[in-house]
Image: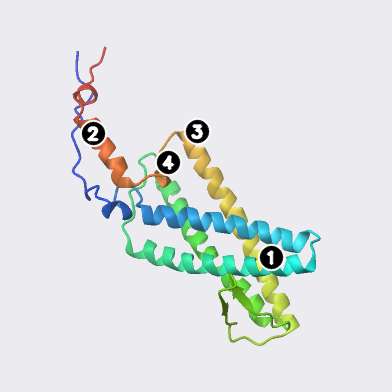
Amino acid sequence: MGLIAEAKPVPAERTTTGSNMLRNDKAGFGWITITLHWTIAALILALLALGYIMRRLPVDPALQFSLYQWHKSLGFTVLGLAVIRTIWHLIEIAPRAPESLSGMERRAAGATHALLLALALAVPLAGWAVASTSTLNIPSFYFNWFIIPHLPMAKSASAEGLWTLVHMALAYLLLAFVALHILAALYHHIVRHDEILVRMFHTGSRQGASSQAAGSDPMIAGRKKP
């Protein structure tokens, strides 16, 4: 009758106070990263849906104008949040990758994450360029609170057409990578049964505290072989 392993509590790198749960630690993400992640994801999906409705479905001109303004307002919001998310990614601790991931999978995940951040910046910037080069010179009303000025770009039909094409191409590329990201997360959750998906729903500190509690439980720490 031998012990399988003697689990020992791992010292926490950060305590589980309310302020520290906002920050990342080596065990997982904090609430700031988690909130930015899901807010940007929801806004991107809303923007893609609005873009399809505006461009592909017959709608009343007055409603179409409102949809364009909502599309631009949400796009500016994504741009601002993506800037914050990028800065936060550069200055904040990166959680440890799960041990189940191979080196190639870790590099692929890092490259995909970087590309998603880049596209979250590039797509709204290209949309801003569309509004700025349009010969219609329609103001961008940010949720009817104030007007966001156009970029200092020459207005012409050719420039507007070019930036419209760029905006659409980048949006479709973003949609493809969002779909890939979702499928990969579901694969890890359903097939691999690892924590890739679930750690985006709770903080690393809470996960670490649970692990320590399990390790200190004599019924768990001292399991024996039958």
Q: Residue at x 73, y 82 (%)?
A: 136
Question: What label sits on residue 121 in the rendered view?
Answer: none
Task: Name the quarter where the N terminus is drawn.
Answer: top left
Q: Position of residue 225 (x, y in %)?
A: 25, 15
Residue 45 occupies quadrant: bottom right
For mark 4, give the secondary structure. helix
Who comes first in sequence, dot 4 or dot 1? 1
C-alpha distance separating marks 4 and 1: 34 Å
C-alpha distance separating marks 4 and 3: 14 Å
Who comes first in sequence, dot 2 or dot 3? 3
Check disc 3: other Cα within 10 Å, few if <14, some if 14-19, many if 20+: few
Along the line of sight, the residue nearer the viewer: 100 or 202: 202
Position of 95 compared to 1: left or right? right
Q: Amino acid at mark 3?
A: Val
Dot 2 and dot 3 residues touching (CB under 8 Å): no
Q: Position of residue 68 (x, y in %)?
A: 68, 68
Residue 4 occupies quadrant: top left
Question: Residue at label 3?
Answer: 191
Question: Residue at label 2?
Answer: 213
Position of 25 compared to 32: left or right? left
Q: Residue at x 69, y 72 (%)?
A: 164
Who comes first in sequence, dot 4 or dot 3? 3
Taking the image as drawn, is residue 160 in sight?
Answer: yes
C-alpha distance separating marks 1 and 3: 40 Å
Q: Residue at x 53, y 55 (%)?
A: 41
Question: Residue at label 4?
Answer: 198
